[in-house]
Image (spheres, rainbow, N blue to C red):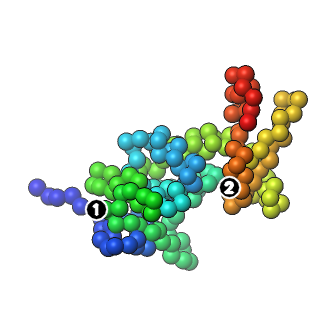
Amino acid sequence: MKTRTLPWTPPNTADIEALPVGRWWDAVRAAPTVGERALKSLGDQNGAVIQDKNGTLYWLVAVGSATSWHLRQVRVLTELADESTYLGVPPASWTEGPKTHWRVPLSLDRYLTDAWKLWEALAEADRAEYGRRPEGRQLCYRCQLPTDEPIPVDTEDGRSDVGKITYACPPHAPLYSKRRPRSLASAAAAEHEGRRPR
């Protein structure tokens, strides 16, 4: 009987080790707001997941399986033609925070996450958190530069069917965290339920 093993060995050290992305696996990085929803949605279908000290989540996926993804607050980390990309990987025994740790521990049974299922979970989390993606680029309210990843940070309800939405780019969106971003869907749901939108 042959014993199964991982194609790579996680760090067996007292610290995080920078390992090359694209060699044994690619990684999908998601901001905490989107990542937490996707993690919950996938449940037992999650492979190993790393969480850094800021709450950002990293799923390990098969090399080349997560290309051309365009989701807000999500990045695919893979080997690039002209430069190396690394991911800080904690020792397998680090399974609790607040430092970087394995949010879903690495094991033979929990290694890679199916990229298609992960994309579906992240796409649904994106829609739930930020609402429908607007057509084209939008200006960031803070820096006044166009962004391909507009995140709604405020909605001005008008007396018409369409309210004005204020967008921010990913680096500036957290500056508006005191005013919880609302999507059009959440504003409409609040109105339907008779609640006053926040």
Q: Residues within 10 Å of mark 2 (few under 14, many from 20)?
A: some
Query: Within 10 Å of the Cα at label 1, are there few (<14), some (14-19), or many (20+) other Cα atoms?
Result: few
Q: To which residue does mark 2 refer? A: 174
| Residue 30 as seen in the image, left or right of residue 185 | left
Q: In the image, what residue occupies the spot 54% across and 60% down?
A: 54
For the C terminus, the image quarter is top right
Residue in the foreground of this view, choosing between 180 and 145: 180
Q: Residue furthest left?
A: 1
Q: Residue lying farthest bottom? A: 82
Q: Position of residue 95 (x, y in %)?
A: 36, 57
Residue type for callout 1: Leu
Instruction: Residue 157 in the image: state x and y as whole percent.
Output: 83, 35
The part of the image, by quadrant, that contains residue 17 is bottom left
At label 2, which amino acid type do we have? Pro
Residue 82 vertical placement versus 102 (above, below): below
Residue at 34%, 54% in the rendered image: 105
Residue 169, position as x, y percentages in the image: 72, 57
Residue indicated by mark 1: 6
Q: Of the residues under marks 2 and 1, which one precedes in the sequence?
A: 1
Q: Residue at x 69, y 33 (%)?
A: 186
Q: Quadrant of the N terminus?
A: bottom left
Q: Position of residue 118 (x, y in %)?
A: 48, 47
